[in-house]
Structures are given as structure tokens and as C-alpha cells.
Amino acid sequence: MASNKKFDVISIGGAVRDITFYTNRGKIFSTPDNLTAQKMLAFEYGAKINVDESYYSFGGGAANIAVSLSYLGLKTAIMARLGNDHDSRQIGLNFKKARVDTDLIQIDDQSHSGLSFVLGLDKKDKDHVVFTHRGANDNLVFQNKKMAGIQPAWFYLTSLSGPTWLKTLRLVFDFANRNSVRVIWNPGVQQLQAGKKTLNNLLKSTAVLILNKDEAIELVLSGIKVGRRSPTFLNRPLYLLNILKDWGPKLVVITEGKKGAWAFDGKKIYRQKARKTKLINTIGVGDAFGSAFLAGLILTKHNIQKSLEWGMVNSASVCSKLGSQDGLLTLAEIKNKL
């Protein structure tokens, strides 16, 4: 990569090929005694199932973020890991089309590119089951040598996986701290499972921590003692915002689905209602919100309320389209919808 190359944002995390398919052959069963899985989707064992419709698209947290930010007019690159295969070439072409710089993409000759199968029974039903093969994403590493001469203003850090995710995470923050790069962070499943004790020092170096409410509850429960109190008090975003802000991030953002989003910078609580939209898809909605929120912070000179509104407009658009990237808006389109 050329020396002294500047970017508004480098997204770090996953990139996958998505395949969405629909069939009405499945049956939904209620399993209320299983608190972590209260509904099950079943198919006849050994049957050959006809698929009514299939849809090929692109996904992965870092990929969605990079494409969205590029649409919004920011100079963007992605750091992700792909296999040496047909899917990686298709993913690369998608980045090229979106004008996302791909020089930091790593090619893994030993692993296949990540792949997700999204199974739905009906387009009218927003719920689905996702089968994910992380593939090469599990082997992503942060390469300091590759970053020589690269000057990002922001890292957008998404879900990391695999055996070395913590080492990679620490290297990202170490580089950011040494080079005055601000980090917006949406922790993934393995990060949330590791909890506050593992993430504590990293949270203190985070410029923006962005989570949905369920993620926020999981992270908070890893770091507080509930005692005899019912943990239901954590259903209130105000509690979550205050607790997480005390852990060190400069700004905490929590999304709450159709109820909107909240933000807290230690001085003021911000709230933005969700926009009414035709709900077709929920995959990639959080990425659409987060990317537009960051674009808002950058382009409106840290107007938090306006940035929340940008996030809501972009996420509502993605909700109305199949796939995690098809509904992403340009800067002009967002401004027209405000």
C-alpha cells in the first residue's frame, strides 16, 4: 500500500458471502421450558426440501460497515481475511464496485471464505435462522507492517472470532493508542462472552461503544453483582448507558429495535425514535445504523442527535430490502429523508 495513505475509516472484522433462501416446509414449535431457545424450527429428517426462492448477497460486519461508509462519501478501507476462492473474488468485486480500498484484505490459502445461509419461512416473517461458517475470518490478524504509512482517523471494530481474537483486539487498540486513531467498537459474541474483566482496559480506550440492548445487558451482567435484585432493571437503557459509560468509553450508544436508540456522553442523554418502515429484513440493520451514526459524527462535527437520526434513516432503509447491503443509502439520500 502506498505510504502516507489517509482514510477516514478502516473497518476491521468479518466479510462473508450471504445466501438467503425461503421455504414453507418448516414447522415452528414452541419450547417455553428452554429459556434460551423458546421456539424451534423443524424439518423432516432425511427429507429433500424444495427452496421457493434464493437470494445471493454480501455480508459480514466489517464489509457492511465499509460499503455503507463509502456510500456516505467517506474514504474507507477494510481489514478482513478471505479464502483463495471464487467467493473471495466476488466479495472483492463488490468492494471495488463500492469504492472500498482492499489493500488490507488478507488471503488465506488454507481456509474458505466465510459463508452464511439465512433460512426464512416467509418474506412476511422477519424472523429467520442463520447458519454461519466463519472460515478465513477466524484467522484474521492485525499486521503492523501492513499499516506502515497508513493514517486512519477512525477504526470501526466489529466482531472478531477464532483462537487469536484477543491478541488481534489488543494489537488494534495498541496501534490506535500510539497513532491517535479513534475506535468505534461493536463487540461480537466472543468479546461479550469474555466480559468486562477481559475487555476492561480496551473499553477505557474506546471513543464510541455501540451495542444493541441485548448485547448491552450481557456485557453489563459480566461486570456487576445483581445480588438479590431482579435483573429486570437492566431492561431500562438509562441504567445500561450509565453503567457502561462508567467503564470508560467516551460515548455509549444503545439501539433498541423499533423503540429507537439512545446515546450518553457523560453529560447528556440523547434519544432518537425509530422510523416506521416496511419490515422485510433484520440482517445488517445494526451495521447500517452504526455506519451512518459514525458518518454523522464525522460530517456534522460530532452532532450526536443528528448522528442518531442518520443511523435511524439508514437502518430503516436496510429493513425494507433483502440483504444487509442492498438498502444502504448514499449521503444525498439520507439528507433527502431527514
Image: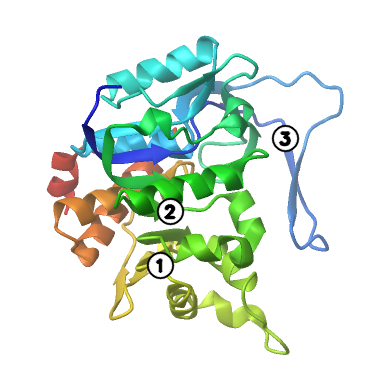
Circle nearer the viewer, 1 or 3: 1
Q: Earlier in the sequence, mark 1 or mark 2?
A: 2
| Image quarter hosting the N terminus | top left
Circle nearer the viewer, 3 or 2: 2
Image vertical order of residue 264 relative to residue 44, above or below: below
**Where does residue 14 sit, x and y in percent of width and height?**
50, 35
**Direction top: furthest residue:** 86
Using a 10 Å C-alpha cutoff, classify the residue at mark 2 as few (fewer than 14 neighbours), some (14 to 19) or many (20 or more): many
Residue at image mark 3? 26
Q: Nearer the viewer, residue 21 or 187?
A: 187
47 sits to left or right of 141: right
Q: Earlier in the sequence, mark 3 or mark 2?
A: 3
Under mark 2, the amino acid is Trp
278 sits to left or right of 49: left
**Where does residue 12 sit, x and y in percent of width and height?**
43, 39
For the residues labelled 1 and 3, say whether their Cβ atoms are less than 8 Å apart: no
SS for callout 1: loop
Distance between mark 1 and mark 3 Cα atoms: 44 Å
300 sits to left or right of 226: left
Q: Tell me which residue sits at (36%, 45%) in the image.
A: 155
For the residues labelled 1 and 2, say whether their Cβ atoms are less than 8 Å apart: yes
Residue at image mark 1? 249
Does residue 327 show up? no
221 sits to left or right of 73: right
Using a 10 Å C-alpha cutoff, classify the residue at mark 1 as few (fewer than 14 neighbours), some (14 to 19) or many (20 or more): many
Under mark 3, the amino acid is Gly
**Where does residue 338 sit, x and y in percent of width and height?**
16, 54
For the residues labelled 3 and 2, say whether their Cβ atoms are less than 8 Å apart: no
